[in-house]
Amino acid sequence: MKLLKCFFLSIFFFLVHSTIIAQDCNCPEFAKMKADHESSQKDHFEYTGKLLASKNIICQAKAYEWIAIELMDEEKFDSSDLCFQKAEILFKQSKCSDSILLNTYKNWAQLFYTKGEFVKAQDKSLKLIGAAEAGRLYYDLAVGYTMVAQLFNQTNQPDQGIIYARKAVPYIEQIKEPAKKIDLLFKLSKRYLWHYQDTKTATSLDTSELFSYQLLEIAKPINKKSSISKAFSNLQGIAWEKGDLKNAIIFLDSSFKYIDANSYADLATNYYDKADILYELKDYKQAAAMADSAIHYYKNLNNTVYVADAYNLSSKIYQGSGDYKKAFEYKEISRTVTDSLRNEERTKEVAELEKKYNQAKNEKTIEHLAQQKRIYLLLAVAGLFALLGLIFFIRQQSLKNKQKIMEAEQRLNRARINPHFFFNALSSLQSYALEGNDGRSIATNLSKFSHIMRETLESSYKEYVTIEQETDFLKEYLELQKIRYPEKFSYEINISPEIEPDDTLIPSMILQPFAENSIEHGFNNISYLGLLTISFYKKEKDLVITIVDNGKGLIQSVKMDTEHISRASQIIKDRIYLLNIKLKTRASFTIENNKEKGVIVTINLPGLQKRNI
C-alpha cells in the first residue's frame, strides 16, 4: 500500500513540475493583449508596460520583442536592435527551449536585412533555423532556409543560396496548413527564379515554374486571391525569361484579376512589368498608360528609387514612339527625383533627347506658333514652381549630406586599434624581456610599439598617407602580432613595380582593421600556418588593394565575431564615403569568401598622388 501511495505521489509531483515548467515558458496574457491591441488600435505601450511590470520573465521578453517590432516599423532601427537584444537575454535566462526565440530571430533578421547589414542578417537567420529545429517547427525551419538563401543571393553567392533553398523543399509535404504551404511554395519559386537569373541554370527556371503551378493548385480551391495573384506574377517573370512575351501579358492580366486593390506594391510592380513588356512589343500607347499607373502607385508608396525607374521607362516608351518632347521631360523628371550626379553616359543621352526634341519643335509650321506660345507660357509657370521646389529639395539634401559627413568623421575619430591589442602587446613584450632576450631586440620592438601608438593617435588628423607610410606601419603592427602569436602566421606585402610607394596616397588606417580581423579571428584555432597577403596594383587609372587570408572564412567568422567584422566594414565604409564625397570619386570595396579558403577583401581606390591633394 505504501509503495502504491509513493508511486501516485511521484506521478503527481511529476505532473505539477511539468505544469510549472510549461507556465515558466509561456506568457498567457500576451496573446490576449495582442488581440485586444489589434482590435482597439490603442497605443502598444499600454500593453507592453503591463508586460514589463510582470514577474514572469517570458512576459518581459515578449514585451521587448513587441516594442522592437513596433520600432522597426517606425524605422528606428538602432533602438529596435537594442530591444531585440534585451528580449534575447531574457528568453535565454528563462532556460526554455531555443524554440521560444523563433519570432525574435525572424524579425531581428528582417531588421538587419532592411538595413543592408547582410552578415548580421545571416547570423540571425542561422539562429532562426536552430530555434525551429529545437521546436520541430517545419514551416519556420523551411522559411529560415529560404531567408539564408535570399541573403546568399544578395551577396552574389547564388550557388550557395540554392543549396539552402533545396534544404527547404522536403518540408513542403510535411506542412499541412494550406496558407503556410502556399507561402513556402511562393518563396521557393522566387529563390529558384533568382538563381536562374544569376546563373542561367535551366533546371532552376523549370523548378520555379513547377512550384508556381503547385501554389495555384492549392490557392485556387480556397480562393486565396493574393497568393494566386503573386503566382501569376511569378509565371509572368518566367515567361519573360523564356522570351514568351504574349504569355507574359496573359499571366499579368490573370494576376491583375486576383490582386488586392490595397496592395500598392503589387499593383505598381504589375503595371511596371506590363509597361515593359508592351514596350518590347512596340505597343507604345498602352505601354505609356501602364507606366503612368506604375508611377501613381510608386508615389503612394513613397519609393523614390522605383518612381525614378518608372519615369525612366516612360521616357524610353515616348522615345520609341517618336514623342521626343515627352521623352525629354520624363528623363528630366527622373533625374530630378533621384538628384544624382550626371555621368557622361546620362549627359549624352539627355542631350541627344533634347536635340531631337528641338529638331521636332523647329519643324512645326507657323500656324501652330500661337498655340505653342500659350503652352510655353504655362510650362514656364510650371517650371518656375518646379525650380523653386528643386532648390528647396537640393538645399535639404545638402544639409543631410553635411550631417552624414559629420557623423562619419566622428565615427572615424573614435575608431582606433582595438585597445586589447595594446594591452596584450605590452604583456607579450614583458614576457619577451623576461625570457632573457637581448636588449637591442627589446628596444627595437618597443620602438615599433611606440610608433604604432603615435600613428594611431595621429590618424584622426591625417586624411591620407603614402603607401610607403602605410606599409611601414603595417609591418611594425604585424611583427608585434607575431610576437603575440609565434609561429601562428606569416605575411606578405606586395607592391606592383608601376606604383610609386612614396608618392601614391591612400586614406589612413584603412587596412589595419582587416589585417587585425584575419589574425584575431580568421587564424583563431586553425591547425595550419596562417598566411596574410596584402597586395597593391594598378587597374587602368585606379589603385586596387587586396587583403587575402587562408583562415576560416566569412561564415565561420560571422559565428565567431560579427561585431568585429562590422567594425572593420564600418571603418572602410566611412573612409570611402568621405573620399567619394570630397573628391567626387567612385571608390568601393567587397568582402567575400576566398575560392580556396579564407576571406578576400578587395578595395578599389582612385589613383591619388601628392600633387593632386
Image (cartoon, rainbow, N blue to C red):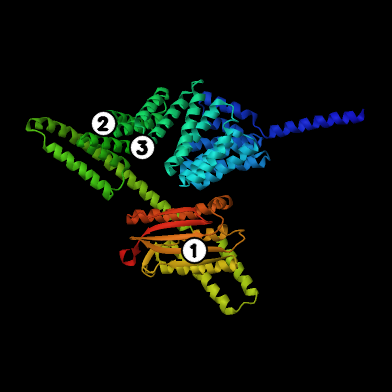
- Which mark's residue is nearer the viewer, 3 or 1? 1
Quarter occupied by residue 265: top left
Query: Which mark is drawn over residue 284?
Result: 2
Q: CA distance from mark 3 to mark 2?
A: 20 Å
How packed is label 3: few (under 14 Cα within 10 Å), some, or many (20 or more)? many
Q: Secondary structure at mark 2?
A: helix
Task: Kindly identify which residue carries mark 3.
Answer: 306
Q: Looking at this rendering, what residue extends furthest in the front direction?
A: 202
Q: Is residue 579 above or below residue 17?
A: below
Asked if the residues shown at circle 2 and circle 1 are in contact, with their CB atoms under 8 angstroms apart, the answer is no
Q: CA distance from mark 3 to mark 1?
A: 42 Å
Q: As drawn, is 309 to the left or to the right of 76?
A: left
Task: Kindly identify which residue carries mark 1.
Answer: 533
Asked if the residues shown at circle 3 and circle 1 are in contact, with their CB atoms under 8 angstroms apart, the answer is no
How packed is label 1: few (under 14 Cα within 10 Å), some, or many (20 or more)? some
Residue drawn at point x = 33 percent, y = 45 percent: 397
Q: Is residue 175 above or below residue 152?
A: above
